[in-house]
């Protein structure tokens, strides 16, 4: 069993990506309008929630480590975050702009209020940028890509990683095109991967190709 606490140093320097089995982002559990906004093929939010939980649990085992890169839940937040307790695995959350534990969008007081809700649902809340290695190669993880947004102009620019040519895995854009883009970014959002977590072996193959 992976010691999650051993992965999460206070400053996230040298994050241990080798211990991660799956990566994903942008589920928006409980968000009534996300199917309309992101072109998802669901007739209701209940159908969306059920399908995403089923597909997650079909891949992820109880001891697998999943890195979720933000926007895990929206809608009535108490209900939607509690819903995620049904998800298998040892779950790490890098907050996105819609998460109530995001310093990009929430006050310190709000984060202190909502963090226990996420933790009670089984999430370990991490900083908004991870910097570490996978198989000896440096890798960054953030909700945000280096550039581009769902609404045109880039938002949350202070919270985006600086592009210094380091490979980055991210979500945020709700693009339906999956995987590698540009020269050193990889989109892992559920809209691009059939609403399933991405095995980290796909990231390994991409890193080897760079």
Image (spheres, rainbow, N blue to C red):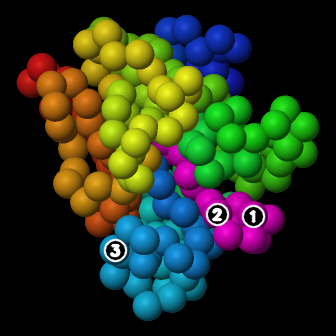
Magenta range is 65-84
Instruction: Describe the element under mark 1 as helix, strand or loop.
Output: helix
In front here: 187 or 33? Answer: 33
Question: Which SS class for mark 3?
Answer: loop
* Residue 99 appears in the figure: yes
- The answer to which of 106 and 28 lies nearer the viewer is 106
Circle on res. 130: none
Name the residue carrying label 3: 39
Q: Residues within 10 Å of mark 3 (few under 14, many from 20)?
A: few
Vertical order, 112 against 174 (above or below): above
Q: Quadrant of residue 85?
A: bottom right
- Residue on which disc 1 sits: 77
User: Label 2, on which residue?
Assistant: 74
Judged left or right of residue 12, residue 35 is left
- Residue at point 22% right, 51% down? 178
Structural crowding at the residue carrying mark 2, measured as other residues with C-alpha within 10 Å and reported as few (<14), some (14–19) or many (≥20): many
| Residue located farthest toward the left when viewing the structure as drawn | 209
- Seen as rendered, the residue at the extreme bottom is 43
In magenta segment, residue 162: no
Marks 1,2: beta carbons within 8 A: yes
Determine the CA span between mark 2 and mark 3.
17 Å
Residue 174 x/y as whole percent: 36, 56
Give the residue displayed 56% in from the left and 24% down from the top.
Answer: 158
């Amino acid at each position: 069993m992976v010691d999650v606490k051993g992965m999460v140093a206070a400053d996230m320097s040298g994050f241990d990506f080798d211990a991660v089995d799956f990566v994903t982002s942008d589920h928006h559990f409980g968000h009534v309008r996300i199917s309309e906004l992101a072109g998802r093929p669901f007739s209701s939010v209940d159908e969306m929630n059920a399908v995403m939980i089923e597909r997650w649990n079909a891949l992820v085992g109880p001891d697998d480590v999943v890195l979720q890169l933000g926007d895990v839940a929206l809608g009535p937040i108490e209900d939607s975050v509690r819903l995620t307790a049904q998800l298998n695995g040892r779950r790490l959350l890098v907050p996105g702009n819609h998460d109530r534990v995001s310093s990009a969008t929430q006050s310190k007081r709000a984060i202190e209020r909502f963090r226990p809700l996420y933790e009670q649902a089984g999430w370990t809340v991490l900083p908004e940028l991870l910097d570490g290695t996978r198989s000896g190669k440096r890798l960054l993880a953030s909700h945000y890509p280096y550039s581009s947004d769902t609404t045109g102009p880039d938002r949350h620019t202070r919270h985006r990683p600086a592009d210094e040519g380091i490979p980055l895995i991210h979500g945020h854009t709700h693009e339906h095109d999956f995987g590698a883009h540009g020269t050193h970014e990889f989109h892992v959002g559920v809209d691009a991967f059939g609403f399933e977590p991405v095995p980290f072996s796909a990231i390994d193959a991409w890193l080897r190709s760079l």
